[in-house]
Image (cartoon, rainbow, N blue to C red):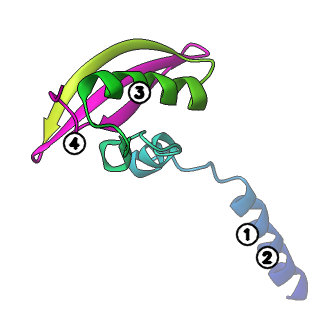
Amino acid sequence: MRFLVLGVTLLAFALAGCQSAPPASKAAEAESLAAYPGATIETAVILPDVTNTIDGVRAEHAYTDKHFPNARWSSQSLLMDKGRVYDVIELVENREKKPLYFDISNWFGKM
């Protein structure tokens, strides 16, 4: 009887080790995207010292040069959501595309 219990216990441990990892969830995917400031609209980068569009564009380029020195701008789009205005920059770094959101509500359209 003792061998049967020991055998069943060992079998349970062996089977537990053979289980495959669960597929990546949407939440896990979103978490990996939110790995840097500006990766999502909720974590959009705010440039606090900017007061007009010209300085804002310069500041966006300076920010990407500093934080993503090996990336290039692939595209830029404007997004309005819940009364806020965002610049969405698509960066390409090591053949990987990644979004970068800037909240430009405070300076968009100001000269």
Q: Secondary structure under badge 3? A: helix
Marks 1 and 2 close (CB-CB < 8 Å): yes
Q: CA distance from mark 2 to mark 3?
A: 59 Å
Q: Which residue occupies the foreground of this view, 48 or 66?
A: 48
90 relative to 109 in the view: left or right: right
In the image, what residue occupies the spot 22% across and 36% down? Answer: 107
- Residue extending furthest front? 111
Q: Which residue is mark 3?
A: 60
Give the numbered dot on residue 106: 4
| Residue 2 image point, x, y percent | 88, 88
Magenta stretch holds residue 107? yes
Q: Which residue is mark 2?
A: 9
- Observer-side mark, 1 or 3, equals 3
| Residue 65 image point, x, y percent | 56, 23
Lower sequence index among marks 1 and 3: 1
From what the image shows, is residue 88 above or below residue 46?
Answer: above
99 relative to 62 in the view: left or right: left
Q: Amino acid at mark 4?
A: Asn
Q: Secondary structure under badge 2? A: helix
Quadrant of the drawing holding the N terminus:
bottom right
Q: Which residues are magenta?
A: 82-111
Give the numbered dot on residue 12: 1
- Observer-side mark, 2 or 3, equals 3
From what the image shows, is residue 69 above or below residue 36?
Answer: above
